[in-house]
């Protein structure tokens, strides 16, 4: 496997707010007899073994067995990652795997399902794939499946929100069973980074083809029913020519339906029946209640490093428990094995000897989005007034107990695209009042909006609402579930609403996602030609230093325009029961997602 040191950053999108990826129990431990096992991974001077490529930190025996008990604030939603909404990305990434993964510096330097790649020219990439990998349905991971998924995403009829992210792909060509050639419309610097996230999460061709045929068959069946009704009516009322035309239409639809039904035989909806290559696979789902994943007995990675018992647990049981206090009670009672902690919970359990508690700076952004398309927030003076009215330090200390870092724009301070010249918007309520008066709202302003309905989001809503009221802004805000919030955003039924992004890796994902007219979460709320030009330039610039400068310039324009209200990047705190073995937070920081996906957790003695 060949790694490129100058590869670009990866990303896993998610709109709005934070998902506890770091709460998953990871392992750096392995059975003593496995330590000397044979690995098929090759390390060279140009491709040295990563520092985090170690097993055995717990100096204990990795044991098979047990179901990890976990909890999520929401049910997973749809299980095809290219369809929205997906509300539990931890579970998604347990079932699906990417072509590439990111290291700790947020660049996609670690090849996973892809074995190697090369660029014969700036608009072509030849990628070789790993052999011997099976999807959960037994079908083979190969070049045909990569091509089919890419074409599936690009087809508008399939309704993939990720389609905008692979817009630069002109076509994909199968060279041989395990080699694909990507053709781009223009040089695409973010290609590898994008393959480390949703568009690169490989889905079984067999499953997708059946899904497409099944859904198309349903559409054709509806058309056929209507055509038959019309034909029956014409048999009594119309002339022979009209009747014959109607008969031909019915016959054509019947033939088409017969073909589709044959293709769809045994097919299931991928939105509810995911088929990836990941270490866990769907066992049972109860929407709104729980998701049960079982161990993939044929997980290729464990075999590739001589540890076929990976993943060690029998599976993962994810209960839907929206209330964080109830989740903590379940953790303390031993009913769940790990959880992401709120700031208050962190203070309560950080010294509890029953748990292993870790902290990391999250690669997520908490923010509020402005509607630039209509309403008072089209005026930059109003946006500035609102932004300066919010005391970010007070929010972090009051709501997060200091567990956060103030944001100045999109990318956090450890991200290679963060513009270090930008400082967070200062708290200045007197300036806010002055700006509102200049904008014609000296007697006050009423704006509308929506936020999520989790406890911490509700608390944030009330705090911001009070700060805005202090300068004369009445924020009439509703707290809604994810689906309702999504509808409000799509319909632009707000002035100021919950925003932000989770997993800010490949820089283009949040840039295009929020600020490009074709972005999956723009919905027509924002359009700026200078911003568009920079986003397009950032996609094409292949030199890392020059590309970094583009994103610095992009952040500066968004910052000067007060495009959104960037609040903070959270500190992610996680508690694991002592029975959960093997997580090394320092190695995780170095290896990033590459470490996470290669070190599945386990129970001491294989029992909960």
Image (cartoon, rainbow, N blue to C red):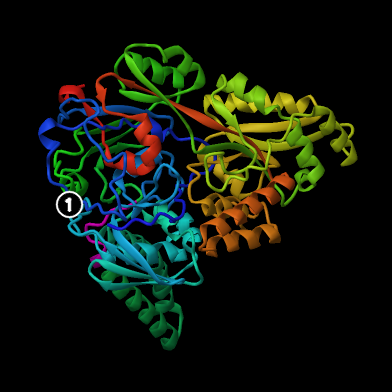
Residue that label 1 marks: 40
Q: Is residue 516 left or right of residue 222?
A: right
Which residue occupies 61% across, 20% down?
397
Q: Quadrant of the N terminus?
A: bottom left
> Above or below — where is 496 with respect to 84?
above
Residue 234 occupies quadrant = bottom left
Q: Is 100 inside the magenta-drawn segment?
A: no
Residue 494 in the image, given as x and y percentages of width and height:
68, 42
Outermost residue, front direction?
45
- Element type where label 1 sits in the image: loop
Residue 193 occupies quadrant = bottom left
Stretch in magenta:
261-270
In the image, 576 versus 320, the foreground residue is: 576
In the image, 98 versus 486, the foreground residue is: 98
Would you say the magenta stretch is mainly helix, strand or loop? loop
Q: Quadrant of the C terminus?
A: top left
> Above or below — where is 403 with respect to 379?
above
> Above or below — where is 114 with respect to 25?
below
Q: Is residue 34 visible?
A: yes
Residue 531 in the image, given as x and y percentages of width and height:
66, 57
Q: Is residue 181 left or right of residue 524?
A: left
Which residue occupies 87% across, 42% down?
439
Q: Is residue 523 visible?
A: no
> Above or below — where is 157 with respect to 520?
below
Residue 5 in the image, given as x and y percentages of width and height:
40, 54
């Amino acid at each position: 496997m060949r790694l490129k040191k100058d590869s670009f950053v990866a990303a896993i999108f998610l709109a709005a707010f934070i998902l506890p990826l770091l709460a998953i129990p990871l392992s750096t431990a392995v059975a003593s007899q496995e330590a000397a096992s044979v690995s098929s991974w090759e390390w060279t001077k140009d491709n040295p073994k990563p520092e985090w490529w170690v097993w055995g930190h717990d100096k204990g025996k990795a044991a098979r067995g047990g179901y990890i008990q976990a909890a999520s604030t929401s049910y997973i939603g749809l299980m095809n990652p290219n369809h929205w909404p997906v509300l539990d990305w931890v579970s998604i990434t347990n079932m699906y795997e990417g072509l590439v993964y990111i290291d700790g510096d947020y660049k996609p330097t670690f090849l996973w399902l892809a074995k190697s790649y090369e660029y014969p020219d700036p608009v072509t990439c030849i990628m070789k794939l790993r052999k011997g990998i099976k999807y959960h349905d037994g079908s083979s991971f190969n070049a045909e499946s990569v091509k089919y998924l890419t074409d599936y995403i690009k087809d508008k009829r399939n309704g993939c929100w990720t389609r905008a992210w692979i817009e630069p792909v002109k076509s994909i060509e199968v060279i041989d069973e395990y080699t694909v050639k990507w053709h781009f419309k223009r040089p695409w610097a973010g290609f590898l980074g994008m393959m480390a996230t949703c568009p690169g999460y490989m889905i079984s061709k067999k499953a997708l083809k059946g899904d497409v045929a099944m859904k198309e068959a349903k559409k054709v069946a509806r058309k056929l029913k209507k055509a038959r009704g019309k034909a029956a009516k014409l048999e009594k009322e119309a002339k022979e020519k009209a009747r014959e035309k109607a008969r031909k239409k019915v016959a054509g639809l019947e033939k088409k339906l017969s073909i589709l039904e044959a293709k769809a035989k045994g097919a299931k909806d991928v939105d509810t029946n995911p088929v990836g290559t990941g270490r866990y696979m769907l066992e049972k789902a109860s929407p709104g209640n729980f998701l049960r994943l079982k161990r993939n007995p044929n997980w290729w990675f464990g075999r590739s490093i001589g540890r076929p018992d990976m993943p060690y647990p029998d599976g993962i049981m994810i209960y839907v428990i929206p209330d964080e206090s109830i989740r903590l009670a379940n953790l303390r009672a031993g009913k769940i094995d790990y959880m992401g902690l709120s700031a208050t919970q962190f203070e309560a359990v950080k010294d509890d000897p029953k748990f292993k508690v870790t902290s990391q700076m999250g690669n997520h952004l908490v923010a509020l989005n402005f509607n630039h398309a209509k309403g008072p927030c089209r005026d930059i003076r109003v946006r500035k007034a609102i932004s300066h009215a919010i005391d970010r330090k007070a929010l972090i200390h009051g709501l997060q107990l200091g567990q956060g870092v103030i944001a100045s724009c999109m990318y956090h301070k450890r991200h290679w695209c963060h513009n270090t010249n930008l400082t967070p918007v200062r708290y200045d309520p007197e300036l806010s009042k002055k700006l509102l008066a200049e904008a014609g709202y000296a007697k006050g302003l009423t704006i509308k909006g929506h936020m999520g309905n989790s406890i911490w989001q509700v608390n944030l809503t009330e705090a911001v609402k009070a700060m805005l009221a202090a300068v004369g802004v009445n924020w009439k805000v509703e707290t809604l579930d994810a689906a309702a919030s999504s509808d409000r955003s799509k319909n632009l039924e707000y002035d100021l609403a919950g925003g932000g992004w989770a997993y800010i890796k490949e820089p283009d994902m949040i840039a295009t996602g929020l600020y490009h007219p074709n972005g999956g979460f723009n919905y027509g709320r924002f359009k700026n030609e200078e911003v568009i030009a920079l986003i397009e330039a950032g996609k094409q610039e292949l030199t890392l230093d020059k590309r970094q400068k583009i994103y610095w310039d992009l952040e500066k324009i968004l910052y000067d325009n007060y495009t959104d209200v960037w609040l903070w990047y959270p500190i992610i705190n996680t508690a694991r029961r002592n029975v959960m073995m093997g997580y090394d937070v320092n190695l995780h920081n170095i290896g990033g997602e590459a470490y996470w996906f290669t070190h599945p957790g386990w129970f001491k003695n294989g029992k909960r």
